[in-house]
Amino acid sequence: MKKYLFLLLTGFTFNAAQSQESTDALRYAQNNLNGTGRFQAMSGAFGALGGDLSSLNINPAGSAVFSNNQAAFTVSSLNTKNNSNYFGTTTSEKDNSFDLNQAGGVFVFKNHNQNSNWKKFSIAINYENTNNFNNTIFSAGTNPNNSVDRYFLSYANGIPFGDFENTNYNRLDFAAQQAYLGYNAFIIDPVSETSGNTQYTSNVPAGGNYYQENTITSQGYNGKLSFNAATSYNDRLYIGLNLNSHFTDFRQATSFYEDNNAPLTNEYTVSKLRFDNELYTYGTGFSFQLGAIAKVTNELRLGLAYESSTWYHLNDEFTQSLVAVSSKNGDADTNDVADPRITNVYAPYKLQTPSKITGSLAYIFGRTGLISIDYAIKDYSKTQFKPENEFTGVNTFMSNTFDNTAELRIGTEYKIEKLSLRAGYRFEQSPYKNKNTVGDLTGYSAGLGYSFGSTKVDLAYAYAERDSQNSFFSQGLTDGAKINSINNHVSLTLLFEL
């Protein structure tokens, strides 16, 4: 059957059924290296050091290490380069962004009672962009085996034809919507045009050699506002607490293109298509942190910190459109457009990210330098969407697929009068058991700082590299590109002693 159909529905639909994926959860469970210039230059190894506003994100006891009131502001430039390899074809895409990465202040209250062992109390407030989502990935190549028709067939097979043939897009759940789009764009047809039919066939020619392009463009941020309180016992033990408010605003547009060079026949077959999807996720969250730093000797410090799960309340809005061109011998090309122009507004849901434990050690070489080491453990398999009964499948998948990971950060600093030289290294294990979907992360950093007395300037450069396997779709067409991502991050901090 050949259809000449243009769907045009306008408006919003409220839908309880949605399709959350493990990649959506991982987006909010992982953090990048952000913060002050000093923090980034030392790769974030501050769990036993304190005395820096960004150190509070590792160990909240760090604010009690401050001797004076301080305020700091950091601007950052992030350059991301994604190198893609899809069936032997290599492409590259760059993205640049600039933002106010950090802003905060700490207030220190000294106890003038000489008989009290509680020497100091501090409060702080600090905001940071824990994740910058601005990114572009472009992949292109010739797939010798699989077409995107498998995506639509994987959703359609098993769904009665009558469920979506004469039903509006906005009345369907996610799976039926994919079948609806595929049918109305002539990608798939029912084996039998009866309402009870549950099997479908493709109108894309068999035989392979499908040229495919996939573009993913994302924008947004994940922000964290921390309210901190800490105290010092006899200037040997520092204890602190963070109450954190999280904000997220994420937009992602994907555009998939496919064409084939199959010879024309006397029957209409699909020769090319474009499938566009747009996702908007926004919401808030809460977490808390507890930490302690022990000054074992004047040179040696030990730190221990616990970061709770982040409990997010999220909202999704989702739009789709599909355009296909079909051809046959002797006739002009025809367009089949399935563009509902409907925004699916899904029911709010919850996401619980995993907790984190960090152990730290730092050695201070008088007034000339230091070395600091952080080691953190985080079990991504504990990530969960809620209500649990509505996300059983994806939660089980994450439990079986995600792994317990370790993260190592090492930082060093050397002072030459008013000049500070800094460097760092970090290694973060893959959150996946297979180590391929998302690989290990390796990063290096360097920077310098200069003190003008009550004003200080810190400059940092951080490099990070990670490989991943980017599947274009979660089912049906699961072929994907190998992505090598490189981040270059430059930050500048102005710090004022008040």
Image: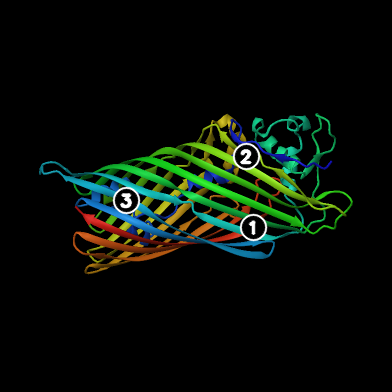
Q: Amino acid at mark 2?
A: Arg
For the residues carrying marks 2 and 1, which lies nearer the camera in this image?
Answer: 2
Camera-side residue: 198 or 429? 198
Q: CA–CA distance between discs 3 and 1?
A: 38 Å
Residue identifier under label 1:
481
Identity, as a three-letter code, of the amino acid under mark 1: Ala
The tag earlier along the polypeptide, 2 or 1, is 2
Q: Residue furthest right?
A: 266
Looking at marks 3 and 1 on the same chain, the residue that comes earlier in the sequence is marked by 3
Q: Nearer the viewer, mark 3 or mark 1?
A: 3
Crowding around mark 1 (Cα neighbors within 10 Å: few <14, some 14 to 19, many 20+) is many
Gap in angstroms between the C-alphas marked 2 and 3: 40 Å
Q: Looking at numbered disc 3 in the image, what kind of residue is underneath it? A: Ala
Label 2 sits on residue:
341
Question: Helix or strand or loop: what does disc 2 sit on?
Answer: loop
Label 3 sits on residue: 103
